[in-house]
Amino acid sequence: MKIYNYLLNIIKTKGACYLVLLDPDKLSESKLIPFIRQCERSGVDGFLIGGSLMINGNLGEFIERVKEETSIPSIIFPGSVNQISPAADAILFLSVISGRNSEDLIGKHVIASPIIRRAEIEPISTGYILIESGVTTTAVYMSGSMPVPRNKPEIAAATALAGEYLGMKLIYLEAGSGAENSVPDEMVNAVSKVCSVPVVVGGGIRNPQAARSKVENGAGIVVTGNFFEDENNWDMIKEFASAVHNKMPVEV
Ligand code: 1GP
């Protein structure tokens, strides 16, 4: 529970936690180290590492390089059962509870569990809820399931509550990487109201204001990925972190 408790503690002290997604397929060798340094300087609380396909990247080697460079926790955000490595600190043990596909609800977990145990990394049980976002995202396509309609916050809330009652430690509202629209604030609000575990929000968040409004609506953890594929945006990492850390005094 070390990393889970770390996340809870950040939420308690800073108001919310800011995680940046590193996709080994998208982040070139030459950009990785400067990007990590910039994240460290800018107040990022942790890295989610993973990708839907992992076409070129080697996850284990990638995490090792990240770990050499920083003490910020590395948490695997697995796109498949192949994405498990002892180099990480923890892994989001994702169950796609918005879908009805048994493989993504429990099947892959049976295969992954002994590997995670051998790797001695911390599994963080996470109810993963895919939200309709304007386009068919990779996450929706790969899971072969229907996302929750954007205008149905009550379905998201009931699904999240079921996840919490099943013992899940995080509820992740996912619009999908590169989503046209992020998860609606009203939905974040409806889910946060019924859940006592932290609500993670990710997908399509492209400015600090959007990040802040997820937190104001109850998100405990905000995730961004795509936006920083463009190096010209790296200067804004700090603004994102300050927007998420709403209990901290604003730095000038
Ligand atoms: C993590 O999929 C997100 O939940 C990341 O989304 O790449 O759109 O920021 P973006």
Image (tube, helix red, strand yellow):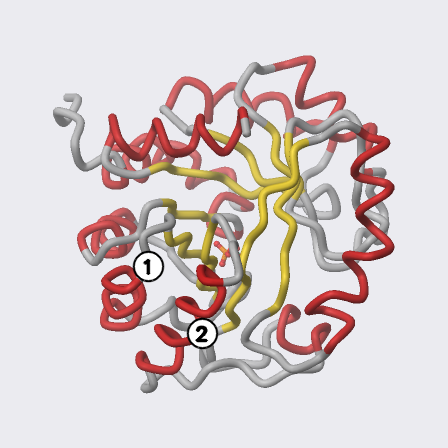
The quarter of the picture where the N terminus appears is top right
| x, y percent for residue 107 | 80, 66
Q: CA distance from mark 2 to mark 1?
A: 10 Å
Of pointers 2 and 1, the one earlier in the residue sequence: 2
| x, y percent for residue 104 | 72, 69
Identify which residue is drawn at 44% across, 26% down. 6
Q: Residues within 10 Å of mark 1 (few under 14, many from 20)?
A: many
Q: Which residue is mark 1?
A: 195
Q: Amino acid at mark 1?
A: Cys
The quarter of the picture where the C terminus appears is top left
Identify which residue is drawn at 86% across, 43% down. 114
Q: Amino acid at mark 2?
A: Thr
Question: On the rendered structure, is 36 left or right of 248?
Answer: right
* Residue 60 or residue 148, whichever sits in front: 148
Q: Which secondary structure, mark 2?
A: helix
Q: Quadrant of residue 249?
A: top left
Residue 169 versus residue 250 in the image, above or below: below
Q: How many marks?
A: 2
Cβ atoms at labels 2 and 1 below 8 Å apart: no
| x, y percent for residue 189 | 23, 65
Question: On the rendered structure, is 252 left or right of 5?
Answer: left
Identify which residue is drawn at 82% across, 57% down. 110
| x, y percent for residue 106 | 73, 65
* Residue 19 or residue 145, whichever sits in front: 145
* Residue 199 or residue 67, whichever sits in front: 199
Q: Which residue is mark 2?
A: 159
Residue 42 versus residue 204 in the image, above or below: above
Q: Quadrant of residue 213?
A: bottom left
Q: Quadrant of residue 73?
A: top right
